[in-house]
Image (tube, grey):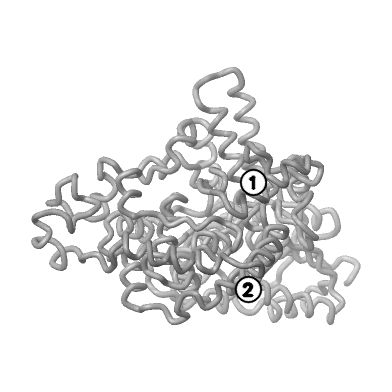
Amino acid sequence: MTALSPVLVWFKRDLRVEDHPALCAAAALRPVLPVYVVEPEYWAEPDTSARQWAFTRESVASLAVALARLGAPLRIETGQAVAVFETLRVTHGITRMISHEETGNSWTFARDRAVAAWARAQGVRWDELPQSGVVRRLAGRDGWARQRDQRMATPQQPVPALRGVAEDGAMGSGLPEAADLGLAADPCPGRQLGGRDAALSLLGGFLTERGQTYRAAMANPLDGASACSRLSPHLALGTLSGREATQAAKARKVEAKGTRDGWIGAMKSFEARLAWRDHFMQKLEDQPSLEHRCLHSAYEGLRPAQPDATRLGAWARGETGLPFVDACMRSLIATGWLNFRARAMLVAVASYHLWLDWRASGVILGRYFTDFEPGIHWPQVQMQSGTTGMNTVRIYNPVKQGHDNDPAGVFTRRWLPELARVPDRYLQEPWRWDGAGQILDRHYPAPIVDPKAAAAEARQKVWAIRTGAEFRAEAAHVVEKHASRKDPQGRFVDDRAPRKARRATATRTRGAKPAPDQLSFDL
């Protein structure tokens, strides 16, 4: 039985059959038993939501169709991964398991450690293969860019021919509904659809039509929704691989060679964002604790551990009385997506103006994002909250952001219809309008803080910590471990780059403003 026992392929955040190294490796060995485990304990975590499960459910169903066509039906089980695998080990004689590496939250990290312990105890060989630019057990950031780029440049894995496993019973428990997992109702009428077909449709539309204005339009709250690729949830769940997206962008750039229609610049920007995606995920891979602890320890205790419930609730509902902030939050609640500039502003307003701990606001945003990716989310939340010790303190002025990014007020009015009577001149500051009493605290809340005074107070508190040799020593360590190695043009470099360029990068990272790419991480 052991000689012909199947290789268990554990699907997690890699819900496709194309460019799937783990599936290809298994197919070359023996018959394949593809497995997806629905884990109720994971879906009970505070950063999960019904909108995320709906997207995941559609993506798993799409994967199941693809595998069935290849002759190796997907087995779907609900329960704890270790218990599921032990049952399959006994019934199928499993001695080999292959999956992709996952950079998830602390729960998935603990679960993977438990699976590894089970595999060792039962004599099951478990191979985890890379599928992104994240490098496990990385000693330091020197050389990371080279490894990442090499992975993205290697040929994509072909869809393998599969030998399935004969089943004498039902193929698992099927896909539960959100309510079955205890997930609260989560209306999200503008949520993106999951599945491989949806991913390919988005990629094709972006590369042929929508992406032409990507570089200029990504920061606009209205235009960004169509000019950005919108591939982020598909990259997060793996219905499309990062290598597929990167190579498609490079091919499109070659096609556009010699033209002046914006496509080359757009594809360069898109490639840069894909690289930044791996860069931020590498941070969590290298230091999983940053999901729960400030990257620079001096910032622990800076903000109240128990956040102000009134402020947190108003922010989470889009009812702060700061129009552009509330419009962005309501858009996110309704669609599950927001461009990066708006995401950064939401975190900054929560952290500085409302003085809320990043862990409290970060969990709420995590639930709202259909494209929630822990490896991107938590490093970004900390960066925008000013707790890394290596990034400049960036306090967005929410009124100015509204004027700059929504000058005609179209986006703000779309999501705040209660401000319909407010003149354009006062839309971002309705409290300055003579007729404010007709609206504020009647149809729309008055601002819960004075944005200028709150920002000034926060700036003073944050910068007061960034002094002294002890702070700088720890900050230098953070830079060495986590900072990007970029040349003066903002491009990633590796350990073969000139020392002068690397020193310039460290200097910018410690004190000056981050590179533009770091503030425009849109997909």
* Vertical arrangement, residue 387 with respect to residue 233, above or below: below
Q: Position of residue 344 (x, y in %)?
A: 46, 56
Is residue 158 visible from the viewing direction of this image? no
Element under disc 2: helix
Q: Position of residue 364 (x, y in %)?
A: 44, 69
Please tell me which residue is depicted at 52% across the width and 78% down the height of the picture.
Answer: 301
Q: Earlier in the sequence, mark 2 or mark 1?
A: 2
Q: Which residue is mark 1?
A: 275
Please tell me which residue is depicted at 41% across the width and 45% down the height of the picture.
Answer: 225
Which image quarter: residue 291?
Answer: bottom right
Q: Is residue 254 left or right of residue 163?
A: left
Disc 2: CA contacts within 10 A as few (<14), some (14-19) or many (>=20)? some
| Residue found farthest to the right | 3
Question: In the image, what residue type sits under mark 2?
Answer: Ser
Q: Is residue 518 left or right of residue 4?
A: left
Residue 106 image label = 2
Q: Position of residue 370 (x, y in %)?
A: 47, 59
| Quadrant showing the N terminus | bottom right
Q: Position of residue 457 (x, y in %)?
A: 38, 67
**Which residue occupies the foreground of this view, 99 or 71?**
99
Disc 1: CA contacts within 10 A as few (<14), some (14-19) or many (>=20)? many
**Which residue occupies the foreground of this view, 8 or 475?**
475
**Which residue occupies the foreground of this view, 315 or 182?**
315
CB atoms of marks 2 and 1 within 8 Å: no
